[in-house]
Amino acid sequence: MGSGSILEARNINKYFTEPVLFHVLKDINFSVKNGEFVSIMGKSGCGKSTLLYILSTMDTDYEGELFFKGERISGKAAEALARFRNEHIGFVFQFHYLLSEFTVLENVMLPAKKLGIKSLEEIRHDAMDKLKLLHIDDQANKLASRISGGQKQRVAIARALINDPAIIMGDEPTGNLDSHNAQNVLNIFKDLVQKRDLSLLIVTHDSDFAAQTDRIIEMGDGNIISQ
Amino acid sequence: MINWRVIFSISKTHLLSRIKQTSIAALGVTFGIGTFIILVSFMTGLNGLLDGLILDRTPHVHIYNEIKPSEKQPIDLYTKVKDAFTTIASIKPKFVQAKIHNALPLMEELNTNPNVKGAIPQLNAQIFYISGSIELGGNLVGIDILEEVRLFNFEQYIVEGSPQALKNNDNGILIGAGVAKKMSLHVGNTVQISTVRGDLFPLKIVGIYQSGLAEIDNIQSFVNLKTVQRILGKPQNYITDINVKLFDIEEAVPMSKRIEEQFKLTAVDIKTANAQFETGTSIRNLITYAVSITLLIVAGFGIYNILNMLIYEKMNDIAILKATGFSGRDVKYIFIVQAILIGIVGGILGLIIGYSISVLIDSLPFETEALPTIKTYPVNYNIWYYVIGISFAMVSTFLAGYLPARKAQKIDPVEIIRGQ
């Protein structure tokens, strides 16, 4: 709730109605500060991914309120939320989720093209910068389907960064990578937090990964156990 | 805010990366539109030809004196039996002269009417063609040849010789093709004709007339108006028929009614004379459009199917687009644009193929006794059919793309991402 709070959740409740009524998130309250690297841990089914999708604004079917830099974003129209995600949130998923028919460079450029603020040349330049930052600029013109898993995840991070978001969210971004690549991704994240004043909110199973973050939020059975 | 350039470039990449499916979808449209163009061009070409066959040479209003009984018999004028039931046995037609009374002033009057393209005289006479001892019954029509050419495309039916040759020869005759064949006559020969009264006249054949309707070609020949008047021994105002051509065919019915009332003559309009003709034309058009629309609907289902499959394949892409900030509407437009692109490319290709095959059909030989001046199949290259074709391609592909695109719009990205 402090002045440096970038994302704040108040009294989030979520129910699944299928197959039976299930109270999946129970009165969740927490916030992420500016430049903080937060990980969410918990067993499978404890609701941590569900929480992340609510925080990401993709899931709007919940009770409670969500604030971004003090502005309420719960209850906004789908169009406005899409625009909001585009501008302020970067995503990295467990599976790489690149558009396989586009080149690496095009994948990174796409969210910026959608935002439509910069010219195509500027976007291209920015995208190359992000790829350089992640040391995969040599793959820029390959099709996204033609590069390795570790490379794909780095491209996904570059894409998350393209619009210079305030926060990056990840759903087990290292879950599908070997330990070498996982460490690589973690180092990149840490680097970003330090150098760019980004906030990170990462859902993970990996306690080694979580141990290296600023703060661990532990969840169990729809409640926050410790934070 | 919709960024069309991004949407367009994503659509293009989707289409080009699966060029086989795209081509098949586009070919469906091409086939539909191409067939529509071919069918409609050929059908309307044929319609135009058949219309021309009858309508071009048929006067819009034909004025003559008809032999018929008086509508009011003397008994009807007898007031003492007004309320009685009367029967008259053996009614005879009223005697009227064959010629139109005051024909020349009447024609002048008609020609000053702004609706009238031209009113021209004809003189019909019963004659015999004499060949040795054989007499063939026939019909000699005196005409103003150059006016006939101007108003009724008469030159199309002169298979040998020319209209000018008749104009220049007072004793010339354009003989019916059937008559010429029966009597082995050729251009340059002389034919003897005899009037009903028995007077013999030699006429020089300056051309051969073939209407395509055997019953006419076997009996009818044409000469200058003056020639018939001379043969019959009648003065220059002796005219049996007046043929009127109007600028607007729709005026024919009121015009003929007015002439009948005003001049006490029989006037037959083209609609009454050829009622069955319009029916044929409209039914042919109906068939053409029904077949074409069926083809386009089939093509539309093809596109629907392919886009539907594409959306199932692209679930992950749709989820990631939505996660990175593309709204449902953006995603919908991405797929609608794909459908419309398929429609435009397929449609334009269809127009090109339709046009090419129409040109091919146009060059195929089509020779028939009935249509002496037609050498190839008739094709109508009306630009409107091409406009209709491309519009229909766009509309049908839009509709076929709209439903799958709406499905894509509604896909919940969370479900897709969680489902992995």
Image (cartoon, coloured by chain):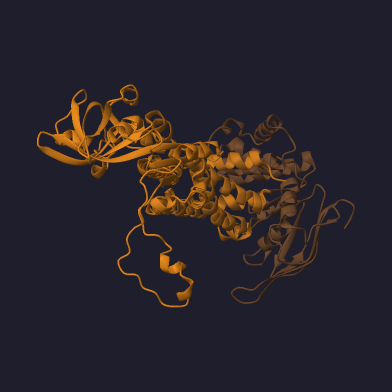
Chain colours: A brown, B orange
Task: Name the residue: 42% across, 65% down.
Answer: B74
Of A178 and B68, which appears nearest the observer? B68
Task: From this view, report whether residue A5 is shown above or below residue A109.
Answer: below
Left or right of B344? Residue A10 is: right
Task: Name the residue: 74% across, 60% down.
Answer: A217
x and y, in percent, of residue B114 in the image: 56, 38
x and y, in percent, of residue B319 in the image: 60, 53
Q: For residue A222, what is the image quadrant?
A: bottom right
Q: For residue B175, what is the image quadrant?
A: top left
Task: From this view, report whether residue A43 is shown above or below residue B223.
Answer: below
Left or right of A97? Residue B307 is: left
Of B80 and A23, which appears nearest the observer? B80
x and y, in percent, of residue B6 in the image: 64, 40
Where's the C terminus of chain B, which quadrant? bottom right
Whether residue B16 is visible here, answered yes or no, is no
Q: Residue furthest right?
A: A3
x and y, in percent, of residue A97 in the image: 58, 48
Left or right of A157? Residue B198 is: left
The mark total stands at 0
Q: Residue furthest left?
A: B133
Task: From this view, report whether residue B167 is shown above or below residue A92.
Answer: above
Whether residue B393 is visible here, answered yes or no, is yes
Of B213 and A4, which appears nearest the observer? B213
Task: From this view, report whether residue B82 is shown above or below residue A157.
Answer: below
